Amino acid sequence: MTHLKSTFLSREPLASQEAKWKRLVKTNYIDPNGVKRDWESAERQTRPTDSSVDGVNIVAFLNKKNGSEILLEKQYRPPIDQVVIELPAGLIDAGETIEQTAVRELKEETGYIGVADKTTGIMYNDPGFCNANFHMVYVQVDMSLPENQNPKPDLEDNEFIECFTLPVSELSAELQKLESEGYAIDARVGSIAEGIEIAKRFKL
Amino acid sequence: MTHLKSTFLSREPLASQEAKWKRLVKTNYIDPNGVKRDWESAERQTRPTDSSVDGVNIVAFLNKKNGSEILLEKQYRPPIDQVVIELPAGLIDAGETIEQTAVRELKEETGYIGVADKTTGIMYNDPGFCNANFHMVYVQVDMSLPENQNPKPDLEDNEFIECFTLPVSELSAELQKLESEGYAIDARVGSIAEGIEIAKRFKL
C-alpha cells in the first residue's frame, strides 16, 4: 500500500466558523413523553439544496469470463489515518439523477464505463451521529467493451485511489485478510460481506 | 409508528465550544506527492481512552421453531427527523470487551439475553467524513430460555425503542416495504440486506 499512504502530521480541534465542508448542528425536538430535548449531530455542507441525499455508493460488477468480481478501492482517509477498502462512491452534483452520479463517479474514480441497473432506497450511515446518506447503485461493467480494456481514472489532484477486484463469493474472507495486512474496512462493503455470509449460513 | 415519533422543533448551528458529545477536527497530512494538506471531519467525544472503537452493532438471531429471525429496532433519530430501522447498537463502556458490550446493550435495548458467537473486524461508517466505527457482533438468542419469553428492555429516559423481527430471507423486501411506509433505513442493516440479495443472485 506504500504509494497510497499519506503521512499523518497532526490533528487539532476545528472551530465551527472555520469549517468549510462539515458543520455541527443542534436539533430541538419534543420526545414522545412531551419532554423538550436537543441532540447534537454533524452534517456535510456540500449537499445540493435540491437533493435529499449526499451521494452514492457503487456496487460495480466486472463481468469476466470466469465469473463476476466486485470493484473496490483503496484510499487513504485522513479522519482515521488509514488506507480504507471501500466501494467507489461520490457526492451528487446539482441537477444530476442518482444513476448519472453513479456512472460519472465510477468513470472518474476507476475509468470503467458501466450501466446502472438497480438503485436501492436511501441508507443512513449513522443516523444518531449525522445526517450522511446515500443510495446504493448497482452498475454492470461489460468487460468486452473496448473502453473497459485499459480503463484510466480521471482523479482530482488530491485524490489517490487504487482500484482492485475481489470474487463476490470470497468477499468476507478477502476483507479479513486485507484487515490483517493493515487496511481499514468501510462499513458498507463490510456489511455486504456479512450479508453474503448470512445468506450462506441460512442457505438462502 | 405514532408512539415513537417525536416532534421536530428546529435545527440550529452549534458552536464547537458548546458541543458536549460531538466535535469537529482538522487533520494535517502530507499526500503521496509530498503536498501538505488538511481534512475536516467529525468525531464522537465519548470514545473511552483505552478503546480504538466507539461501539457495537448487533446482529441478533432469534432462533424460533419456524426458522431464524433477525432482531431490529425502530428509533426516532433527531439528526434526520425520522424513525429509523436499525440493528441494536451501543457505545462501549471503559474496560468492557466488545462481546460484553454487545450482550449488555442487547439486554438493555431489547430485553433479550443472548450469547455472542462471532465478532467481525472493525468497520468504519464513513471514513471520509468521521472516525465513527464499530465491531459487528453476532448474538444467538435461545428462545427456549425462560428469560426470553417476555423480555423487558431497560431503557434510559431519553430512549424510545420498539423491537421487532424479520425473517432473514425476506430482509430486503421487508426493508423496502418499511421505507415505503415512511421509515428510514440504516446503512448497516440495508447493506446486510443487499449482501443477502447479491448472494441469492450469484447462488452462493
Image (cartoon, coloured by chain):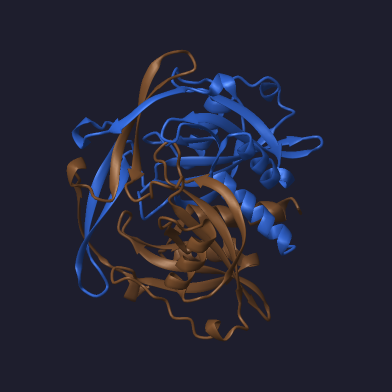
Chain colours: A blue, B brown
Q: Is B169 positioned to the left or the right of A136 in the image?
A: right
The quadrant the C terminus of chain A occupies is bottom right
Q: Residue B127: give x, y in percent of width and height.
A: 45, 38
Q: Is A189 positioned to the left or the right of A174 in the image?
A: left
In the image, is residue B78 above or below residue A109?
below
Q: Visible in this render: residue A1?
A: yes
Residue at 65% x, 66% y: name it: B169
Residue at 47% x, 58% y: name it: B96
Residue at 63% x, 83% y: name it: B144
In the image, is residue B80 above or below residue B149?
above
Q: Visible in this render: residue B15?
A: no
Q: Which one is nearer the viewer's eye here, B175 or B50?
A: B50
Q: Which one is nearer the viewer's eye here, B3 or B50?
A: B50
Q: Residue A191: give x, y in percent of width and height.
A: 57, 51
Residue at 65% x, 30% y: name it: A164
Q: Is B115 positioned to the left or the right of B162 in the image?
A: right
The quadrant the N terminus of chain A occupies is top right
Q: Residue A201: give x, y in percent of width and height.
A: 72, 61
Q: Residue A48: give x, y in percent of width and height.
A: 33, 38
In the image, is residue A145 above or below residue B128?
above
As drawn, the residue found furthest toward the right would be A66
Q: How many marks?
A: 0
In the image, is residue A82 above or below residue B203?
above
